[in-house]
Image (cartoon, rainbow, N blue to C red):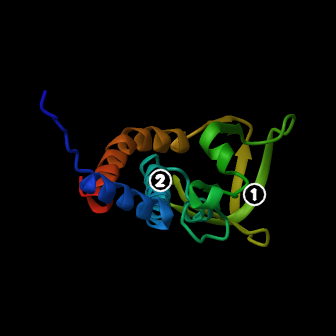
Amino acid sequence: MATKAVEINFSQLSSFFDQLEAAGNGALKQEMIKFIEGIGDEFLRIVSEEIIRREVVDTRLLLNSFQKGSSDGMWNIKDGGLTLEVGTNVEYASYVNDGHWTNPKGVERRFIPGDVVLDGDGKIIEFTYNPSAKTGMMLHQKWVEGRHFWEAAIRIMERMLPGLLDAKISEWLHDYLGI
């Protein structure tokens, strides 16, 4: 019986493993961190758009708090840059999002001093709290329905994320592994 041999050339596979190792030694992780930060920026943009679209009474503090670098915003990077927590530290954000009573229990009405901007129909379009203002608004006890801008932004991002992630993974496979 004649000797038969099978020759397997692993040179391309070796190159593939070298590329994987190079990608795993920092380059790919840095790309993932940039991607995660980009997702965070996009989410903050969507939240801001939802605040505007839902016609939340804008005190500017709330809207501006959903920007990276805002003193009232939340932008926390953890786990070596692979976890990003975004949000706002504005105290009343949850009231605007979830809904709230205008006054504490048992208080029928109260005056809030501040600077008010009205539209042509007398609807408040902007209010800035100012404790020394002679103008302001009188709040009568009632339930103010939440604007639910946060949940809307999450739903939008959840629809976008699979496509963004697929595209980015394909780009990484092409760039780092030539696939």
Which residue is depicted at the point 51% across and 52% down? 123
Question: Around disc 1, counting alpha carbons within 10 Å, would you say few (fewer than 14), some (14 to 19), or many (20 or more)?
Answer: some
* Callouts 1 and 2 close, C-beta under 8 Å: no
**Tag 1 residue:** 112
| 147 to 18, vertically: above or below | above
Where is residue 73 shown, x and y percent of the image?
63, 63
Residue position for label 2: 43
Residue 124 seen: yes
Front position among marks 1 and 2:
2
| 145 on left or right of 31 | right
Query: Marks 1 and 2, how far apart in space?
Result: 32 Å
Residue for point 72% across, 51% down: 138
Q: Amino acid at mark 1?
A: Ile
Residue 175: mark in rendering: none
The tag earlier along the polypeptide, 1 or 2, is 2
Whether residue 119 can be seen here = no
Please identify the residue farthest to the right as the structure is shown: 106
The residue sitting at 68% across, 44% down in the picture is 95
Q: Regarding mark 2 in the picture, which secondary structure is present there?
A: helix
Q: Residues within 10 Å of mark 2 (few under 14, many from 20)?
A: many
Residue found at the very far top of the displayed protein: 1
Quadrant of the rendered structure where residue 60 is?
A: bottom right
Where, by quadrant of the figure, is residue 80 drawn? Answer: bottom right
Q: Secondary structure at mark 1?
A: strand
Locate residue 1, reporting x and y percent: 13, 27
Amino acid carrying label 2: it is Phe
Lateral position of residue 30 relative to residue 175, left or right: right
